[in-house]
């Protein structure tokens, strides 16, 4: 099912060059963005800490010390623990560490500013929850309220996503978990599942060695800044779990059905998550068990049918949200800048280790495409790169991709398994440093 090859000990110079080029792209995005932000430039990018969405605001907070200590512990102890702990305790420890890391990063901005208030602004889902008195009615009239400039138009994030995203927060509210604190806690709990799901996927596909290598990097990913707290972190957790179940279906075929249900629900969390079909297909291709695809497709279809029966047709919503997108600031944000500045934002969110690993994955794919189709690490990373490429070229995510692309970016994490063992701890330290520097210099909007 998979081909295991030891990471090449050569290529350090190429790795550093790749990271250096990435830094140049980020630097250019910052410089050009600041140039556009100057008064009288005539260009509106609507991002005040380009290429990230937030504000330049050097600061420390209650989470600073905890974040630094956690980073030191994971960097010094993480790789060795990942190599020797039994599998299930390792996954539990990784998940707990990810929760602590994500929460400590959020606390750098403070309890209200960094955690409880993130999902409670007038543009977010919670703003609409009190007005939703009945779920059937909400679903049946959802499409009619997507377009802007109506008395009852949905707020920005509700209108920009299928109803599944809003439903999650409505369900929390119905369970008595009201307000921003509970919503943020739930998002982080689900979002951190990526730290389990990505290694589980690799292990199920025959690469537990890679899975153990990836886990500490998944814990300290700079993307944790936006897992805590943006709804896209939730989307990443849900869909990554779906992909993991799909991989596990190689041993228990029935798991393909809940995998399809989760991936199908992902379609109703964000329209762009349809592109995760490439990741799912890569996993199925690696298993070479196409009956799994049939069961998963049935699960996806079941979710689509339920939403259609309730009054929401996905394609109608998609076409309306594209129209809504260009009713807003998307008409002002220049594609010529964001088509490459989005990549700069992604580079910050994935960190230097993933950049270097992705460079190696690309080199392996070009050197032996046929062999790459048998290696879970290379094929999944290649599928993730293609997914991000399609999302970027679509022009439907001009800015804010550091959070929007989280569900895609987590599937670049396997690339770190291609880094030589002696250098991994240094790369892990670079990941932690990236997250800490960004979180302390920029007050992110999520």
Image (tube, rainbow, N blue to C red):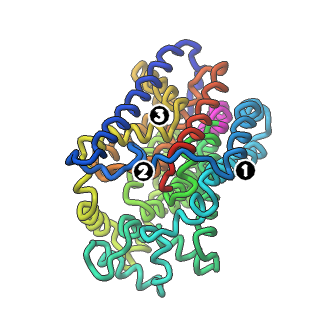
Mark yes or no: residue 276 visible: no
Could you say which disc has been placed on residue 222 in the image? none
Confirm whether the magenta stretch covers residue 169.
no
Query: Residue drawn 73% across and 50% down?
Result: 96
Q: CA distance from mark 2 to mark 1?
A: 28 Å
Q: Which residues are magenta?
A: 202-216
Of marks 3 and 2, which one's residue comes earlier in the chain?
A: 2
How busy is the neighbourhood of tag 1: few (under 14 within 10 Å), some, or many (20 plus)?
some
- Give the residue at mark 2: 53
373 w.r.t. 53: above or below: above
Mark 3 or 2: in front is 2
Mark 1 or 3: in front is 1
Q: For mark 3, give the secondary structure.
A: helix
Residue sitting nearer the eye, 366 or 55: 55
Q: For mark 1, give the secondary structure.
A: helix
Mark yes or no: residue 425 visible: yes
Q: Position of residue 189 (x, y in %)?
A: 64, 58
Residue sitting nearer the eye, 84 or 295: 84
Query: Residue drawn 44% across and 74% down?
Result: 306
- Give the residue at mark 3: 379
Of marks 1 and 3, which one's residue comes earlier in the chain?
A: 1
25 w.r.t. 325: above or below: above
Q: CA distance from mark 1 to mark 3?
A: 29 Å
Residue sitting nearer the eye, 346 or 386: 346
């Amino acid at each position: 099912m998979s081909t295991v090859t030891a990471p090449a000990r050569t290529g350090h110079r190429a790795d550093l060059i790749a990271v250096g080029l990435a830094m140049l792209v980020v630097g250019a995005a910052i410089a050009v963005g600041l140039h556009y932000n100057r008064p009288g430039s005539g260009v509106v990018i609507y991002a005040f800490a380009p290429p990230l969405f937030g504000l330049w605001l050097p600061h420390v907070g209650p989470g600073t010390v905890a974040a630094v200590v956690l980073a030191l512990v994971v960097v010094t102890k993480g790789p060795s623990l990942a190599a020797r702990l039994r599998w299930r305790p390792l996954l539990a420890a990784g998940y707990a560490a990810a929760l602590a890391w994500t929460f400590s990063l959020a606390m750098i901005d403070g309890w209200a500013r960094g955690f409880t208030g993130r999902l409670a602004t007038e543009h977010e889902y919670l703003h609409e929850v009190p007005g939703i008195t009945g779920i059937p009615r909400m679903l049946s009239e959802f499409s009619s309220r997507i377009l802007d400039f109506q008395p009852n138009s949905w707020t920005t994030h509700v209108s920009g996503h299928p109803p599944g995203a809003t439903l999650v927060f409505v369900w929390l509210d119905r369970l008595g978990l009201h307000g921003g604190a509970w919503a943020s806690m739930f998002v982080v709990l689900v979002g951190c599942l990526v730290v389990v799901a990505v290694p589980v996927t690799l292990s199920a596909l025959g690469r537990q060695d890679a899975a153990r290598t990836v886990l500490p990097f998944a814990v300290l990913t700079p993307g944790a800044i936006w897992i805590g707290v943006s709804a896209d972190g939730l989307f990443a957790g849900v869909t990554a779990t779906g992909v993991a179940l799909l991989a596990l279906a190689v041993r228990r075929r029935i798991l393909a059905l809940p995998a399809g249900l989760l991936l199908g629900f992902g379609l109703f969390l964000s329209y762009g998550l349809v592109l995760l079909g490439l990741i799912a297909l890569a996993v199925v291709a690696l298993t070479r068990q196409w009956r799994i695809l049939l069961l998963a497709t049935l699960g996806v279809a079941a979710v689509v049918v339920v939403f259609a029966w309730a009054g929401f047709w996905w394609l109608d919503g998609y076409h309306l949200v594209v129209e809504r997108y260009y009713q807003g600031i998307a008409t002002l944000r220049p594609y010529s800048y964001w088509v490459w500045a989005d990549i700069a934002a992604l580079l910050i969110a994935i960190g230097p280790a993933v950049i270097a690993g992705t460079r190696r994955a690309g080199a392996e794919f070009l050197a032996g495409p046929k062999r790459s189709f048998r290696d879970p690490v290379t094929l999944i990373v290649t599928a993730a790169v293609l997914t991000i490429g399609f999302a970027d070229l679509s022009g439907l995510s001009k800015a804010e991709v550091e959070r929007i692309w989280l569900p895609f970016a987590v599937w670049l994490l396997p690339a770190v398994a291609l880094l030589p063992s002696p250098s991994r701890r240094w790369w892990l330290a670079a990941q932690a440093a990236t997250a800490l520097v960004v979180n302390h210099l920029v007050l992110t909007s999520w």
